[in-house]
Amino acid sequence: MTDIDFDQAVEDFWQASQGGAFPVQWQDTFDRETAYRICLAMIERRSAIGDAQAGWKVGLTAKAIREQQGATEPVFAVLYDSGRWQSGVSHPYSDLMRPGWENELCLTMGVTLKGPGVTEDQVKAAVATIAPALEIIEQRPPPGKGSGFLSGADNGQQRSFIVGTETAYDASIHDLGKASVEVFVDGKFEEKAFGIEVMESSPLSSIVWLTEGLSRFGHELTAGSVVMTGSFTKQYRFEGPVEVEARFEPFGTVTASFT
């Protein structure tokens, strides 16, 4: 870990999450491990105010997003109960900070997985349900003041995750690498992409990667947790009101409007 005042860094990011100033003073200080440890330290603090952990997100899984963000590898962060919204939600645009969204599948775990060494076959046996989903992200540092490690400490840009109807997962019929999404913005078709864009393989590979990453910090992927497995597409950003629709084949549709 970088030689910093870790407790002070945690406090600064906690205050920022509660509406305080974003701690840009740490911009050139963190390494990746420190950023993860700050992010994970928030789980207990959020729980103490009644906001329990819902699961995990895996980000930067698609080559298009890594190129867009100048990143070289995926990242993980935390999902909280307060951030779970249902498909069809209408939310004030003015409540968001430099927002965007990603088009993903949300998987619910039926069995606990503990790394290292988890295999894709184990993941297939552990997944219970799949839902079409959108992740809402925010770019919270002031323009020009951000960095990848700051975003990691700030929970990987996570604001909320919007989920549609769940489908029971059946590995014998559901090939997640062949799943597709069609993205519509204000009713206009934007693009079609496939699950193979996630980890250049499948959203299941995100789960394998996540269990490995969590094991380095003494965490496991528990039964009942949800996982946002990473976007099929680039990250979409919006600068005003917008209506979003993502049609996932064969898992259904998820919609949201920001007014």
Image: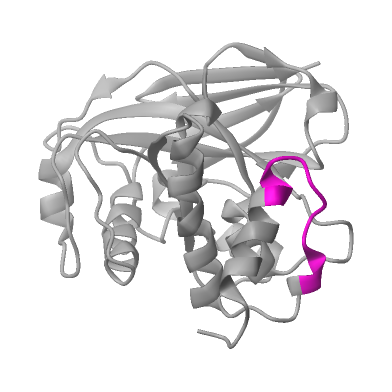
The answer, for residue 135, to whether it is visible in the render is yes
Q: Quadrant of the C terminus?
A: top right
Nearest the viewer among 79 and 66 is 79
Q: Quadrant of residue 11?
A: bottom right
Is residue 45 magenta-colored?
no
Residue 101, placed above or below residue 73: above
Residue 50, placed above or below residue 145: above
Q: Residue furthest bottom?
A: 3
Q: Position of residue 190 (x, y in %)?
A: 69, 34
Nearest the viewer among 28 and 148 is 28
Q: Position of residue 3 (x, y in %)?
A: 59, 88
Q: Position of residue 149 (x, y in %)?
A: 63, 70
Residue 9, placed above or below residue 19: below
- Magenta residues, start to end: 15-25
Is residue 21 magenta-colored?
yes
The answer, for residue 58, to whether it is visible in the render is no
For the rendered model, the colour scheme is one colour
Q: Residue at image x 36%, y 24%?
A: 251
Q: Residue at image x 24%, y 33%?
A: 224
* Drawn side of residue 117 relative to residue 64, left or right: left
Q: Quadrant of residue 185?
A: top right
Q: Residue at image x 54%, y 63%?
A: 38
* Drawn side of residue 95 relative to residue 153, left or right: right
Q: Quadrant of residue 52?
A: top left
Q: Position of residue 197 (x, y in %)?
A: 46, 54
* Drawn side of residue 190 relative to residue 106, left or right: right
Nearest the viewer among 172 and 220 is 220
* Drawn side of residue 163 relative to residue 160, left or right: left
Mark count: 0
Q: Residue at image x 71%, y 42%?
A: 236
